Amino acid sequence: MNVLTLSDKVVDRIYNASIIEQFKYIDLIIGCGDLPYYYLEFVKDALNSPLFFVRGNHSSLVEYGVTGSKSAPQGGVDLHRQVVNHKGLLLAGLEGSVRYKPGPFMYTQAEMWSNVISLLPRLIVNLIEHGRYLDVLVTHAPPWGIHDREDFAHQGFKAIRWFVTVFKPAYHFHGHIHLYDGNEASETQFRHTLVINTYGYKEVDLQLITKTRSSKSPPLGSSKV
């Protein structure tokens, strides 16, 4: 399954009529936050592919445009605190960053634990019905200690690190951490999960084992920018 993941900045190569030719084999679009809703709508409509998203700490409560106001990209599925089965692909999402000032879509470490716990009942159902908890976790912020930064605003969440450790999604896509140095790591294999910072965009060919995954066999995947 070919996935186009997006976060944090509008990319000219994406917001362009040529997107149809450049990404014509995309099966799924994932937004990891801090993007205009009109941008996500453009990509969804141009590629005629399903859109799943979470909001970032800079996402708008309401976005105003020529077509009126909106609080989400039209036709997209908000993954925050949700577990979704899309044609056999099991996804879940958590929005926002660490709360470093007043405003929406930001959470304390304790509040993020509450968000994570809200997902647990459906994950147990997934294990019973599908033999695994989850395939893809979508967040805005990274896990604690993986791709995050030392400054408070860009610290990762401890609850997300615990979640990835316990529920072993094959992939974890996040945003929030801007990459300006080509030497900075954007992909890290953490135990059974490939953690991918999708700043800007990434095209990823998901390699998934649809039966119960062996604890000795981490998933393989490839991505390109």
Image (spheres, rainbow, N blue to C red):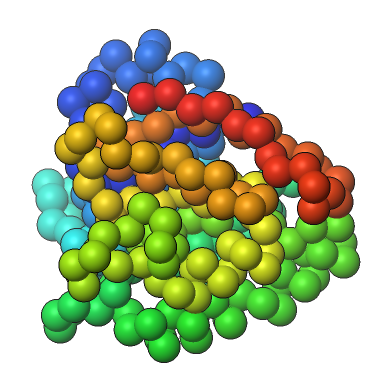
Q: Residue at x 68, y 64 (%)?
A: 167
Q: Is 33 placed left or right of 89 in the picture?
A: left
Depicted 127 relative to depicted 186: above or below: below
Depicted 179 relative to depicted 1: above or below: below
Q: Residue at x 77, y 72 (%)?
A: 124
* Residue 216 percent coordinates (x, y): 80, 47
* Residue 100 percent coordinates (x, y): 18, 78
Q: Quadrant of residue 59?
A: bottom left
Depicted 83 relative to depicted 2: above or below: below
Depicted 60 relative to depicted 195: above or below: below
| Image quadrant in which the C terminus is located | top left
Residue 88 seen in this snapshot? yes
* Residue 131 percent coordinates (x, y): 86, 57
Q: Residue at x 34, y 34 (%)?
A: 201
Q: Is 147 placed left or right of 89 in the picture?
A: left
| Image quadrant in which the N terminus is located | top right
Q: Residue at x 60, y 32 (%)?
A: 221
Q: Quadrant of residue 44?
A: top left
Comparing 26 with 215, the one in front is 215
